[in-house]
Amino acid sequence: MTAPVYAAPANAPVEPATKQGRFLLEREGVLGPLLLLPAVVYILALVGFPLILAVLYAFSDVTVGSPHITSTKDFVGLANFRVILNDPVFREALRNTIVFTVVSQVIVVVLATILGLVLAEDFKGKRLVRFLILLPWTTPIALSVLGWFWMLDSVYSPIDYVMREVGLLGPHTPFGPARNMYWLGKTNLAQASVIAVHVWRTLPLATVILLAGLSSIPKDIVEAANMDGASYWRTLFKVKLPLLTPIMSVAILFSIIFTFTDLSVSLVLTRGGPVNDTQVIATWAYFKGIQGGNLAQGAAIALFMVPVLVVIAVLMLRLARRTETT
Amino acid sequence: MAVVETRKLTKRFSDEVVAVNEIDLRCVDGEFLVLLGPSGCGKTTLLRMIGGLEQPTSGEILIADRVVNNLPPRARQIAMVFQSYALYPHMSVYENIAFPLKAAKLDKAAQREKIAWAASILGIDELLKRKPRQLSGGQRQRVALARALVREPNVFLLDEPLSNLDAQRRASARDELQVFQKDIGTTTIYVTHDQVEAMGMGDRIAVIDSGHIRQLGTPHEIYEEPADTFVATFVGSPPMNLVPEGDELVGFRPEAFYPITADTPSDTSSVLRVNVINAREEYLGSEKLIYAEVNGIRVVSRLPANVDAGIAEGSSATFGVLRSNLRHFNAETGLRVQPGRVPVLSGAANA
């Protein structure tokens, strides 16, 4: 048996300098940017480039027929914005967008809190209920809105059928004498329908976020409140909900973005009608810019979403930072 | 008067898991009762059932001579301090202490008065405006105590309140907590797995294992007169030596087991002499431990560090233990028995 050798033998092969390149990927300064690259390219190509194009278009006179900016003469300054702001339809679309967003978010917050609290409890079939509640979120929006389009159909609506069967609709009934509600044909009903579909769609995400928030509240704290003599409601309003606020704000901000920028619901359900009662910024930009061929005005309309979204984005980032530091 | 009493209290989590098994316990007024046991022994479940956070499977819980099984925690006139302290993170210290008072719908002036009183007792007047995250572990513990104190409960339930403190802070907190309890005189049930806390603070200790109370007694009784081998080995560090002899186990504490030199005066009628082999010494600063074997059973002797036992590594030696310090247990059941015969221990030497 020989004694162990601790020093390298003199003729040990020395790593050639050229081969050290293979450790390049283990350096954080190299690997990090490399891994980020696909996401950066994606965002620049599919978000950044269209955004710049939209800004350029908004200040130009491009149309579908002549979509190129060839000289400075194509720039028309604020002319597009002047036209839009003088257009009563745009003003209605802006108002509708804000009203739909605010009303649906208020409903979503209340319902998501209730649902979250219920689903946080233990009961039989909890998993099934959770799964069912998440379903609307997993369906592609255009498809699910088509489903609602049929649900709210002026003649074949199953909701109307049920109402007729239980005696709420038809001759000599509370909602009669018509045999149909015409959900998408009357101003209030159409607006309520759009809001309802928004609620139906954003509720699952908000509920899941809230559930996560609820389960992150230490059990001890709720038990301590119980010990301290707090009733269910006091525990809910003074302990649970305040602790949920940060995560609830995240849920709300997400939902606001989804609802504010949404095109599909109004487009598929009502095409902005009746008249322009459910017209929103997204649909109006689409009708003006793509269907009407006035790319410049369409872009200018769409840009009105930017300030709101910037404010929300800033709020979200701040919130994220605050939850990071505490 | 019994402030807290349990009658055949049982908690089953499933068919196999019985966390608490028919426990009968009486806690008298003003007493500091410690529930001591290893983790998973059921002590915390027992405490949580008394507090109302856990519904018993069977049996009764009485607080101030009233059955409270069906009362929610808030109706039991008790206060609990949690292991995590469970302070409300979004409230200031003041609001934390005010929370139970608000729940009791006390008016603002009375609230202020009570909070000032509790804060001065616990020395946290300076911290009232802070948020829990700005407090140290010891400060949090005092805030949690203040929050419990303002309710003026019949009973304090404390669930390992010192386990989140570092070792140094724990020793002083132990002292403070004991002084606090004696000052306010409120009956306290204290759960811990730390025998030092139990011995140092408890008026009485209930040693719990596998859902049963193995022994209930004063720290002195628990240590000197253990009811079975579990108590004998769970309490004491190092644990009691247990040497089998016939159908008995003969037990003696390490500090009662000392080396005998030629000039040690001793007579065999009061001292049992034991020959040991393979002795090894461990120096621990304030004391030293001597490990050795008696017929293959490891035994430990604890001596002050300044005693020179003159024992060489691996050597044989003669040790002695006062016969009055011997405890006898049934080898099968582990229960304490009266000695069946005069022990000689197989390794024993006759002088």
Image (cartoon, coloured by chain):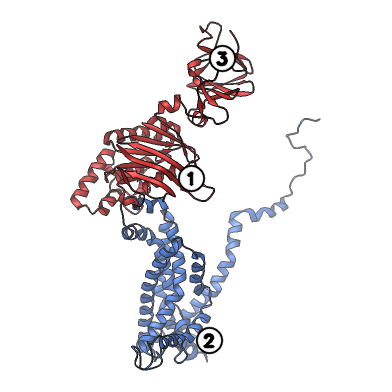
Chain colours: A blue, B red
Q: Determine the CA span between mark 3 and mark 1.
A: 42 Å
Q: Which residue is mark 3?
A: B319
Q: Are both tags, 2 and 3, on one chain? A: no
The percent position of residue A286, horizontal first and vertical second, equals: 47, 86
Taking depth in this image into account, of A232 and B58 the one nearest to the observer is B58
Residue at position x 36%, y 75% in the image: A102
Residue A72 visible to an observer of this rendering: no
The answer to whether residue B97 is left or right of residue A204 is left
Image quadrant containing the N terminus of chain A: top right
N-terminal of the two: label 3 or label 1? 1
Are discs 3 and 1 less than 8 Å apart at CB?
no
The answer to whether residue B207 is left or right of residue A236 is right
Q: Which residue is mark 1?
A: B19
Q: Which residue is mark 2?
A: A68
Are discs 1 and 2 less than 8 Å apart at CB?
no
| Disc 2: CA contacts within 10 A as few (<14), some (14-19) or many (>=20) | few
